[in-house]
Amino acid sequence: MSEPPMTTVGAGHAAERVVRPRRALRAGITHAVAAGVAVALGILLPAIDGGSRVAGDRAVAVLNVLGVGVLSVTALIFSLMFLVVQWAAGNFSHRLALFRSDPLVWRVFAFVLGVLVYSVTAVLAIGSQSTVSVAVPIAALVMAAAAFVFVRRLQLVALRSIQLSHVLDELRDRGLHVLDVYCPPGEEAGFRDSPPGAPLLPGSVTASVPWRGASVLVEQFNLLPLVAAARRGGAAVVLRVKVGEVLYDGDPVADVHHGTVKAAEVLKAVVAGSERTFHQDPGLAFRLLSDIALRALSSAINDPATAVQALDAVEDLLRRAAAGPVGQETRAIADASGTVRVILPVPGWESLLRVGLDDILVIAPAMPMVLARCRKLLTGVLSVAPAPLRPPLEERLAWTEQQLTNRPPFMRGEAR
């Protein structure tokens, strides 16, 4: 029995990072910095005595117009975000969050908020001054121009977020990135020929940690402190739940092997969320692509061409997965000394096939175009898959060929 492929904490892999808390922290810091800089500029610029001067009432008029315009832009941002999210949920998948999770959204909002704060602060600082430095209206105009550029950029991102080809490419790219982290091709070649199975567990189980409380979705694991806690206790923590699964009261979270780790430290590593994220979830891209294809194949939409495009991305992901150690359903996280401290469960080959292909394959017989594309997908992945991964592909290909034999010969080829 082979050991799971290993990642060393801090060795260039992103598996240890936690995105959601950092993203929330960065968003809050960005808003605070924008507001702070705006207040400082709003106080300092009207206090400049030298240089060119303009009438104070004219500067106030410019600032008032800018403030009203900024409020309109803020309303536009929220309206655009709502419409794009609603459209993507209705036409692609309710789990698709590409636009609303884009950092550009809250960065633009932070900048626009800063412009509004600057306008209000500068108006109050000017007060009854008859003249003010020309830097006050110039700064306002520069901010307005920058806001226009940022909002234009946000508009382009929003438009791309409702284009099918862009969404499929984005899902494929994110899925490939996660697969490169958890199933890196080439460097783990020794694991490619290993049959699926359980990993070698590092010592006997000294404790099991159950979940207590309301049910939660496991969005991520905060692996850095968990690795540190396991290192301090001379233990190895084997997580029993995958990222993207739901934990219920009493469900096992992890087993502690060989040493001791406090249950509170293990539970603290569980980052609960309201929805799945790409960061530590290799199966999410497969799930979203399958959602898009299934929605396209529904009787209400009946768009097999969209399903074929989604299968193009699924094949790309499966080919990349077949090049890595997907026969192993775990990923070992080691500390700086190379000692395995955490074993993280990840989706295996069968799981990726079930999520990304099987639901589509069941509906495909009613759509000859999609069925033929499924056959091409299975044939293509078979050509690059190592021997241990071929049986489930061959089983599905045989079923697909059988379904195609019930079709007229001219309907067995792929169409676009």
Image (cartoon, helix red, strand yellow):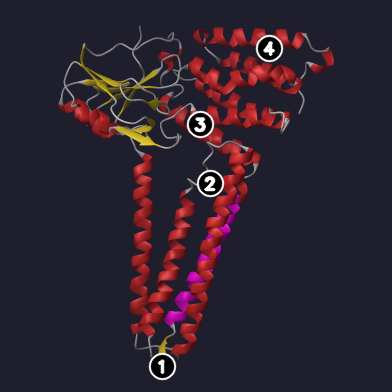
Kindly identify the residue that appears in the image at 60 percent across and 7 percent down. Answer: 395
Return the residue at label 2.
99
Give the number of the mark in front: 3 or 1.
1
User: Could you say which quadrant of the image residue 117 lies in?
Assistant: bottom left
Q: Position of residue 24 (x, y in %)?
A: 37, 48
Return the residue at label 1.
130
> In the image, is residue 134 above or below residue 20?
below
Kindly identify the residue that appears in the image at 56 percent across and 23 percent down. Answer: 356
- For marks 4 and 1, the one nearer the N-term is 1
Between the C-alphas of marks 2 and 1, the distance is 46 Å
Return the residue at label 3.
175
Between the C-alphas of marks 2 and 3, the distance is 17 Å
- The foreground one among 41 and 221 is 221
Tell me, yes or no, whether the two marked residues, 4 and 3, touch with CB atoms within 8 Å. Answer: no
Magenta segment: 135-158
Secondary structure beneath dot 2 equals loop
Q: Position of residue 190 (x, y in %)?
A: 41, 13
Q: Amino acid at mark 3?
A: Gly
